């Protein structure tokens, strides 16, 4: 990109895009203007990747998860490993076949930085809450371009990783960006995004990458094949129904609302399960109109002595978060939230569109509508109309039981979050 094209994009960002977004505070708006102006003054010295990261950083100033810039195509190839934050560190869960021996290793340092320092330095570039950033950051900490930007490395050609291997030994390996992309990587496709690294790909997938859980036969239902909606009974008496909703949109031609209707007619109404587990831990959003009826009806259709357990995590975001909030609002005496803090606050801005910048075509999403699941939305003048009509009021979306899974449990295929729900059933 020529510097003149960069400046044209920055003018568009400041004068055309920014007025559409309502999520910036007055102080954040001033900081946004300052950063855009500084970037504009430096365009003669900026590489395209540096320019794109400046756009990403400008959008992230709002600290609103929906106000963001998609610059993936500027970042080039990733390292041949995929990782996830557990309660006890950042661990490799998936690799290119050439590096399968690194599965299970804990990453202690990336170049000159500890992993904690690396995550701290990447925060200004990632939109949203700290929990949202914890979800997003592993996907960027394997990008040499990003690692150079945050000062972890000086040269993108090789990235030193200091690892604590599965056998307990410490080793530093140097990795190069791999042009052989992971065929199962969904971070750029929409469905589940970064959480997809936790689930092994189909064995028949051509060129699939080895996964830490490949040799684990008895896995939690959370780590089975991804989809929009799936369900199973966890007991022979059909008293415990497990429902996993990974995205608030259909992945095929059957509308998601029809799939929920079928779930009611085929499993919930005929069997009247006492306990229903709704697993939203992989649910990164979609269109929450698809779950309004489900969320409002479900708590009212369990028996008088029944309960609904909503499992949630850092990937639960946007319409996924709204679904959890609506379930809680429809049955506060019957619904229990278990797991991690979700990927956003109870008050956030969303409902915007992605606007491409004229030259770089970087898609920057603006957020014009306000959601409030804490105090509740009552005025159309200040809130998104659907939250006024359907949103809960005066609830908490914080987990009643907080569980951050450690690496050993995950590597064994265990699911402490689901286990906690089952334990609570036994105490009833």
Image (cartoon, helix red, strand yellow):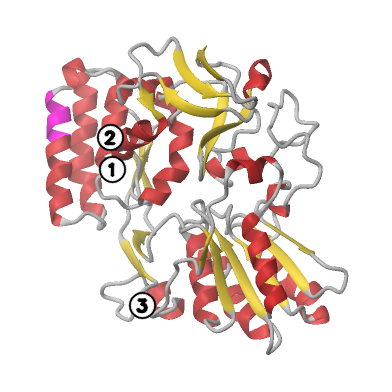
Q: Do the residues labelled 1 and 3 touch (CB within 8 Å)?
A: no
Q: Name the residue under label 1.
A: 59
Separation of residues labelled 1 and 2 (CA atoms): 6 Å
Which residue occupies 45% across, 15% down? Answer: 160
- Separation (CA) of disc 1 from disc 3: 26 Å
Compared to 303, does 361 lie above or below?
A: above
Residue depicted at x 31% and y 30%? 53
As measured in the structure, the alpha-carbon distance from the residue carrying label 3 to the one carrying label 2 is 33 Å
Q: Quadrant of residue 255?
A: bottom right
In this orientation, which residue lies closer to the viewer: 303 or 283? 303
* Pair 3/2: label in front: 3
Residue 403 lies in what quarter of the image?
bottom right
- Asked if labels 2 and 1 touch by Cβ distance under 8 angstroms, the answer is yes
* Residue pointed to by mark 2: 55
Q: Main secondary structure of the magenta part?
A: helix
Q: What element carries label 3?
A: loop
Q: What element carries label 1?
A: helix
Q: Nearer the viewer, residue 41 or 180?
A: 180
Left or right? Give the position of 352 relative to 255: left
Q: Is residue 359 visible?
A: no
Of tags 1 and 3, which is closer to the observer? 3
Q: Earlier in the sequence, mark 1 or mark 3?
A: 1
Q: Where is residue 205 in the image (x, y as percent from the top left)?
A: 76, 30
Q: What kind of element bears circle 2?
A: helix
Q: Mark on residue 350? A: none
Q: Do the residues labelled 3 and 2 touch (CB within 8 Å)?
A: no
User: Could you tell me which quadrant the C terminus lies in?
Assistant: bottom right
Pointer 3 residue: 376
Q: What stretch is highlighted in magenta?
A: 36-41
Compared to residue 129, the image places residue 200 above or below, namely: above
């Amino acid at each position: 990109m020529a510097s003149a094209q960069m400046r044209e994009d920055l003018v568009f960002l400041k004068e055309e895009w920014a007025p559409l977004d309502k999520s910036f505070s007055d102080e954040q708006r001033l900081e946004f203007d300052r950063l855009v102006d500084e970037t504009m003054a430096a365009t003669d010295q900026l590489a395209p990747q540096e320019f794109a990261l400046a756009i990403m950083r400008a959008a992230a100033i709002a600290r609103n998860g929906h106000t963001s810039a998609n610059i993936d195509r500027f970042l080039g190839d990733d390292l041949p490993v995929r990782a996830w934050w557990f309660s006890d560190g950042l661990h490799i869960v998936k690799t290119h076949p050439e590096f399968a021996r690194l599965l299970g290793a804990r990453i202690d340092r990336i170049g000159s930085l500890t992993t904690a320092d690396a995550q701290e330095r990447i925060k200004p570039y990632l939109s949203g809450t700290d929990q949202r950033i914890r979800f997003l950051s592993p996907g960027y900490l394997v990008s040499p371009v990003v690692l150079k930007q945050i000062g972890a490395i000086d040269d993108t050609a090789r990235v030193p990783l200091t690892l604590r291997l599965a056998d307990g030994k410490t080793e530093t390996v140097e990795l190069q960006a791999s042009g052989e992309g992971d065929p199962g990587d969904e971070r750029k496709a929409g469905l589940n995004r970064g959480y997809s690294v936790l689930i092994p790909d189909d064995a028949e997938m051509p060129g699939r990458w080895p996964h830490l859980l490949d040799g684990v036969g008895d896995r939690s239902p959370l780590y089975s094949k991804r989809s929009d909606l799936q369900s199973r009974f966890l007991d022979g008496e059909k008293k415990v129904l497990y429902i996993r909703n990974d995205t608030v949109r259909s992945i095929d031609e059957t509308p998601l609302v029809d799939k929920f209707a079928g779930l009611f007619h085929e499993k919930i109404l005929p069997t009247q399960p006492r306990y229903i587990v709704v697993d939203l831990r992989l649910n990164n959003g979609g269109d929450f109109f698809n779950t309004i009826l489900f969320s409002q009806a479900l708590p009212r259709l369990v028996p008088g002595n029944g309960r609904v357990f909503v499992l949630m995590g850092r990937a639960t975001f946007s319409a996924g978060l709204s679904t959890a909030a609506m379930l809680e609002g429809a049955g506060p005496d019957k619904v229990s939230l278990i797991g991690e803090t979700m990927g956003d606050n109870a008050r956030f801005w969303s409902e915007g569109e992605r606007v491409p910048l004229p030259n770089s075509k970087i898609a920057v999403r603006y957020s014009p509508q306000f959601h409030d699941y804490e105090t509740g939305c009552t005025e159309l003048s200040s809130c998104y109309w659907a939250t006024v009509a359907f949103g809960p009021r005066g609830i908490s979306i914080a987990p009643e039981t907080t569980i951050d899974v450690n690496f050993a449990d995950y590597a064994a295929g265990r699911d402490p979050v689901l286990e906690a729900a089952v334990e609570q059933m036994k105490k009833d």
